[in-house]
């Protein structure tokens, strides 16, 4: 089976690595960024091109959401299988006379960070059971955690991921701004961050909540507000505390 990955960013890089690790042959990696394509090609022994899209049975579009539709138009072959890797787009966003699908890995991807692909959930959707089974077989070579999911379910999976990952990481970035402003090493907070994230693997997040807001400790809340000189930090602090208070109201 001939497989082509379209894209050269974080997701394309990690999918190429996951396929390489599991000896799933990739016929080509295709995209605009020749430097990034060359890096993937050299690391994972994949032919690359920025001009000529190879013939394939399965095209996997791993680009930013706003580019998926336009990139999908580059696939002129008919009656092949084409899947995007987005959690927030329906499979029908793909434009072409081919079978449309979704192949969504639920993870945050950075090229510089090693991942255990065996733990990544994959959500797949196709137009027929044969295509679903084909993608399931490919995904199962990477991870045992594979599920079928239509767009209605997948978009809520993606929304939850934004809360659980993107928002949390943003709070880490804002927390570092505060520690940096006082010359406090952010590494001091690593054990706290590790305990916070590992704790919810064993108990419900709602049960794990601590801090002044859940205790309704107005003295500490006011003290913290007086220390926040950046308006954005103060806005976030108040918004988060109000949300915590509402969750634990009797």
Image: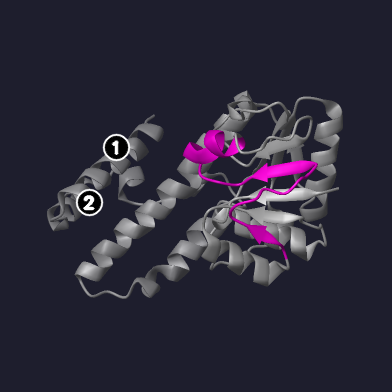
- Mark 2 is surrounded, within 10 Å at the Cα level, by few (under 14), some (14 to 19) or many (20 or more) other residues, namely some
Q: Residue sitting at 81 percent across and 47 percent down?
A: 138
Residue 62 counted in the magenta span: yes
Residues in magenta, as a range: 46-72
The colour scheme is: one colour
Marks 2 and 1: CB-CB under 8 Å? Answer: no
Q: Quadrant of residue 227?
A: bottom left
Image mark count: 2
Residue 107 at x, y = what percent?
59, 50
Residue occupied by mark 2: 233
Instruction: Judge by depth and name the residue closer to the eye, 111 or 28.
Output: 28
Please name the residue shown 49% across and 45% down the image.
164
Which residue is the site of mark 1? 242
* 97 lies left or right of 144: left
Q: Residue at x 20, y 55 (%)?
A: 224
Task: Examine the rendered structure and indicate whether residue 117 appears above or below residue 122.
Answer: below
Please state, as top left, top right, bottom left or bottom right, where the C terminus lies in the image.
top left
3D distance between C-alphas at marks 2 and 1 = 14 Å
Q: Which mark is residue 68?
A: none
Residue 51 appears anywhere in the view? yes
Q: Is residue 221 left or right of residue 121?
A: left
Q: Position of residue 97 (x, y in %)?
A: 71, 26
Provide the secondary structure element on which disc 1 rests: helix
Q: Which image quarter: residue 98?
A: top right
In this view of the protein, which residue sits in the foreground, 65 or 114? 65
Q: Tell me if residue 121 is in the magenta stretch.
A: no
Q: Percent position (x, y) of residue 33?
A: 51, 58
Lower position in the chain sequence, tag 2 or tag 1: 2
């Amino acid at each position: 089976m001939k497989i082509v990955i379209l894209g050269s960013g974080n997701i394309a890089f990690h999918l190429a690595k996951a396929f390489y690790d599991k000896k799933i042959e990739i016929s080509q990696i295709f995209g605009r960024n020749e430097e990034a394509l060359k890096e993937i090609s050299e690391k994972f022994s994949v032919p690359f091109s920025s001009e000529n899209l190879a013939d394939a049975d399965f095209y996997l579009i791993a680009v930013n959401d706003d580019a998926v539709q336009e990139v999908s138009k580059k696939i002129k072959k008919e009656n092949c299988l084409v899947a995007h890797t987005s959690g927030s787009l329906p499979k029908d966003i793909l434009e072409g006379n081919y079978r449309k699908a979704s192949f969504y890995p639920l993870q945050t991807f950075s090229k510089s960070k090693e991942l255990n692909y065996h733990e990544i959930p994959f959500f797949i959707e196709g137009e027929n059971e044969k295509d679903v089974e084909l993608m399931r077989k490919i995904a199962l070579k990477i991870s045992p955690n594979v599920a079928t999911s239509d767009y209605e379910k997948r978009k809520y999976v993606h929304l939850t991921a934004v809360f659980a990952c993107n928002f949390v990481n943003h709070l880490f970035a804002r927390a570092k701004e505060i520690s940096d402003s006082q010359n406090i090493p952010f590494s001091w907070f690593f054990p706290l961050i590790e305990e916070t994230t590992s704790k919810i693997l064993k108990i419900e997040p709602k049960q794990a909540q601590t801090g002044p807001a859940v205790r309704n400790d107005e003295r500490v809340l006011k003290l913290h507000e007086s220390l926040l000189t950046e308006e954005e930090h103060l806005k976030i602090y108040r918004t988060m505390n109000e949300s915590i208070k509402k969750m634990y109201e009797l």
